Amino acid sequence: MAFFALKNVTKSFGGLVAVKTVSYEVQPGQIAAMIGPNGAGKSTAFNLVTGLYVPTSGEIEFNGQSIGGKKPDFVCKLGIARTFQNIRLFAFMTAVENVMAGRHVRMGAMLWDSLLHTPKQRAEERHVREKAMELLRFVKLERHADDYAHNLPYGFQRRLEIARALASDPTLLLLDEPAAGMNPREKEDLMELIRAIRDRGTTVFLIEHDMGLVMNISERIAVLDHGEKIAEGTPAEIRADSRVIEAYLGKSA
Amino acid sequence: MLHWKKYRPIDWALVAIAVFMPFLPLVDHNGGHINVLVNAGIYMMLAIGLNIVVGFAGLLDLGYAAFFAIGSYTYAMVASPQFGLHFSFWPMVLISAFVAAIFGVILGAPTLRLRGDYLAIVTLGFGEIVPQTFLNLAKYTGGPNGISAIDQPKLFGYHFGLNPLPYYYLVLVLIAFSLIVANNLRTSRLGRAWMAIREDEIAAAHMGINTTTAKLAAFSLGASFSGLSGVVNASLLTLVSPDQFKFNVSITVLSMLVLGGMGSLPGVVVGSALLSILNFFILPQASNLAATVGLHIDFTSYRFMLYGIILVAVMLFKPEGLWGSEQRRAELKESDITKAENAEYEEMPRETV
Amino acid sequence: MELFIQQVINGLSLGGIYALIALGYTMVYGIIELINFAHGDVYTLGSFFSIAIIGLLDASGRLHGVPLLLVLAVALAGSMILCGIVGVLLERLAYRRLRNAPRLAPLITAIGASFILENIMQLWRGPSPIPFPSVVPNVTWHFGGVNLSSNEVLVVVMALFLMAVLQIFIYNTRLGKAMRATAQDRDAAQLMGININMTIALTFFIGSALAGVGGFVSGIYYGSTWFYNGFEAGLKAFTAAVLGGIGNVAGAMLGGFVIGMVESLTAGFISDQWATVAVFLLLVLVLIFRPSGLLGEVLPDKV
């Protein structure tokens, strides 16, 4: 059984087939990527993994379990966390509260504990706050812990979203166009951050259309076009693939 | 963490008033006043409970009075000549709250998946069904006359009777308890989950928050506060009847929240206190005053005009209420996530819907 | 069997009134996704306006000189226009500022607006029921044990006729097209040069004018009204709109008739007391099990 695999996954909306029999496998410890032009079906693929959409057919496997069609909170509990293409932070919560909310699924406080603030609950809250601060340090936002998320600059918001996702101790982190809207300097930092995440033991799977970034950090790449996987391989193989050049590079470069 | 500097003089004034409240009966011996304060206190408890649902979790519950009715009738049926049962008041406080919570789960479990505005209407429908059902099941509930001669509490042999003073202290204790519990909830794992759901339900689900369970918890906790208030209300009035639990009760409580600031505990206290003062003192006085100059207008029958104006004006000009934060203002003014962005993730037909 | 047919007839005329109100709910929800809570009160206002206008014509002694049909036409038109204006004012004053706010906010102002309208009506004509001038001769036909009155026919014909007109308007006119475009994607419609504010105001005008018709015919049908009439009627009409598939004109009509039927059959075969409960129970069940409504998927077009 694979660590994480899409197996012949298809998703159609009415008559439109957004993802067509796509198969792709990610090995633990990898930085893997899926690329493709706008509308190629990348985000749909992510949404299928995290349970926002139910696959029309095919299987999604994670740690030997079939997760296709499972609800988002269940998928998160199993160890998959994600960020969103158009940042979806809890805008009116502080940075540290956002990260603490991300820890929700690993916390044990029950209704009773929340009602009465039992010693167990208080100890857990303290611990989770420390853990959240540690993650904020990891993404270099510790100085903004008490700032409201919607007051943070764009690049910071992206990093905060990553910290929030990491708070659930995922073994697989999905990054949905993490470099969108970033300047070259920020992209450098981002690549460094992604590598650091992998080095902590979290497998990273990202979708992007910034080719430079993807080629630079990914070990394995799948290329999607019109919902179909047209190529898969190492960055070098992808660069040399004629179909990819035609479908993607040819147009955008 | 306490940031003393953040407190304004008006905050201190609020604290001072709260501290003074237990000593008020020493100064004011007017039983009528105390009675009014007890009624106001019951509304404050209702408001604290509804705030959990509307303010914390962002679910508009327009049928909140239904749970008040359920709590009241639960106690009335087992502590009155209706069935010849005379259960003790104190355990019934907890039991009625629990019964109301169960009805909260029964209504909430199938409906909490609905979008917010549909949920509001379902709860409104439920709020209409419940008193109508109590009216129709005359065999058990006394129909339009309701149930009367309801038992009053006894504490260590002391009989509450018709004196409002013991009720005053009972309600004061219950309000303090409710505020502590509500504040605990706000600053806990569950409270954070509610806030996250209110801000962005899809993102919250991706943090592993089971949004249905969390909403259900808010809904039934709110219902239990309402049920608890119902028991106190029933024993105070010694009478329950279906017309005590109409839509206007739900709206009165909602107006209190909106006025004070949805989600803010001091706001709820201030909002409910202000509206009660308006209801029980200002409007009747204004009617009396008008009568002395020959004008015969019963201002109290137009109180809902005022509630309507409060709801519209506050939402338009000060959506955070009198006591809400700037953050809350921004939150209620404009959602960060546009509809188009949400539509991208909205795929309604999960198998369950 | 006779009871059944009689209750079906009653249900259809009740349903015609609900349908007229439901059209306004469904149009407004279709275009700005707001449950216009005050809509039921606009309907009651329609009865109030009709009563006032007929009273005015009557009081000045002109009723006997003027043909009855003309009086009724003036009352109907007046009620439609005045209700339309109230609807537009509601949108402008209470809802427009909150168009981009979280959904809860405009819903709360709508509830507030509803209470304000009710109290204005209470101030205007007091809290007791107000008789509708009995100027329309009501002819009753007997078929065996079943009665059919001209008023019942009037309600149903009026509702069906207006729905047909509305359908034609929405699908065959430029303004109708603008409404559909705005309902589907407000931003895109704006880019196409559609005046969004105008279109939304127009939607409110038409929806409210239809409620005005509802108020007029219900006045004739019931013979009286009171300031709080719109609360329950509005809630039932909203149920009809959801049942039919919100945003769907034909659905609102269908939903209206179904709700009318459920109410009158419950009243006829179980008991009067449970009729309202049955309707609200249906509301709860529909929202739980089929929130897209009866016609929600067949005709997905909004407005």
Image (cartoon, grey):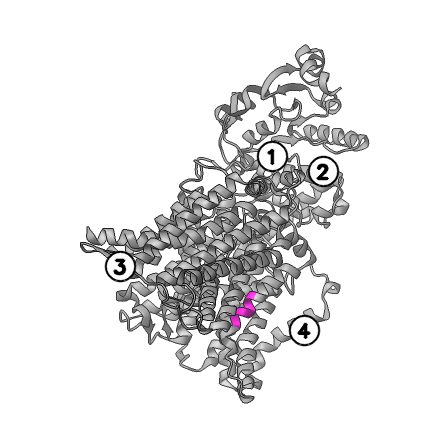
The residue that disc 3 covers is: C140
SS of the residue at dot 2?
A: helix
The residue that disc 1 covers is: A81
Q: Residues within 10 Å of mark 1 (few under 14, many from 20)?
A: many
CA gap, disc 2 and disc 1: 14 Å
Whole-percent x and y of residue A141? 75, 42
The residue that disc 4 covers is: B13
Disc 1 sits on a residue from what chain? Answer: A
CA gap, disc 1 and disc 4: 47 Å
Q: Are marks 2 and 3 in contact (CB under 8 Å)?
A: no
Q: Are marks 1 and 4 in contact (CB under 8 Å)?
A: no
Q: Do callouts 2 and 1 point to residues on the same chain?
A: yes
- For the magenta stretch, what is the residue range? B303-308
Number of callouts: 4
Q: Nearer the viewer, residue B13 or A64?
A: B13
Q: Nearer the viewer, residue B45 or A121?
A: B45
Amino acid type, mark 1: Ala
